[in-house]
Image (tube, rainbow, N blue to C red):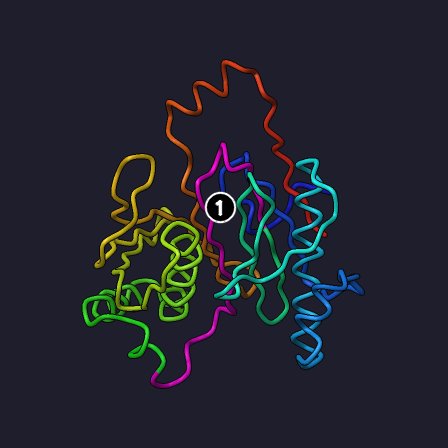
Amino acid sequence: MNANALIGSILPPWVVAVDTFDDHDAVLFPAEEEVISRSVENRRKEFATARMCARAAMGVLGLPPQPLLPGVRGEPQWPIGFVGSITHCAGYRGAVVSPGADTITIGIDAEPDEPLSNGVLEAVSLAEERKALSALAADYPDVSWDRLLFSAKEAVYKAWFPLAKRWLDFEDAILTFDPVAGKFSARLLVTGPQVEGRQLMGFSGRWMATEGLLLTAIALSASSASRRRRSALKRPVPQAIVRA
């Protein structure tokens, strides 16, 4: 193991991250095999390798190997008391896991740093976002901003769904990017769920472009009051970031 997981570099230190650039001969549990049995080989490989990463991250947190079955929207169903997220794209698989006492929800996504196909941007963005992306592309042409927007909206959805338990369309949140700090924000245009006694209004996240990839991540941390209580208990928080 080494502290080089790409996705981990844009997440808090208490989140355990594992990623890989290669598919591995990962072993699936029978229930997982059943889920993926009718899928093409490429889909099976990405499914299996991503779950291998997830189980490695869970192991750092002391969890035994166990199935990670998809829920009603395909989201991984994490062990009780833990939250996490999985992503995969051509040439990259990654997973992150955190104790639920530290992190309320996580959403990660990876995409190739390449422009979207014709017509896709219009389907996943708002007019205001497209105007902002044009300005960003003029000033920072080395980033595929349309694909980054898509990735960030995927991360938003992955963070949203465990809390709201309902669909979030691409036009239901408006995103803005900080090209220098590597941050983004998402303002919800629909009513969000109650989180720690407050209505969820949006998310803040981080992004990076490296090694031909665009990576986006959201980690909604537990309240500072909760963190102070946990600190008083002196519970150690694993900080390993590993690469498979």
Residue type highlighted by circle 1: Ile
129 relative to 72 in the view: left or right:
left
Q: Is 180 in front, or is 242?
A: 242
Indicate the position of residue 228 as horizontal and vertical percent values. Answer: 43, 19
In the image, the segment drawn in magenta is 96-119
Question: In the image, residue 182 lies at what x, y percent?
Answer: 39, 50
Residue found at x 29% / y 63%: 136
Q: Residues within 10 Å of mark 1 (few under 14, many from 20)?
A: many
Q: Position of residue 152 (x, y in %)?
A: 39, 60
Q: Nearer the viewer, residue 54 or 199?
A: 199
The single residue placed furthest to the bottom in the displayed view is: 118
The residue singled out by tag 1 in the image is: 10
Residue at x 39% of width, y 68% of height? 150
Corner quadrant of residue 155 = bottom left
193 is higher (above) or lower (below) than 47:
above
Figure label count: 1
Tell me which corner region of the image, top left, top right, bottom left or bottom right, holds residue 148.
bottom left
Q: Is residue 205 magenta?
A: no
Q: In the image, what residue occupies the spot 25% across and 48% down?
A: 201
Q: Position of residue 200 (x, y in %)?
A: 28, 45
Query: Which image quadrant for residue 219?
Result: top left
Outermost residue, top side: 232
Asked whether 109 falls inside the magenta stretch, the response is yes
What SS does tag 1 mark? Answer: helix
Q: Quadrant of the N terminus?
A: top right
Q: Is residue 77 above or below residue 239?
A: below
Q: Residue at x 62, y 64 (%)?
A: 92
Q: Is residue 14 left or right of residue 137?
A: right
Say above or below: 153 vs 233: below
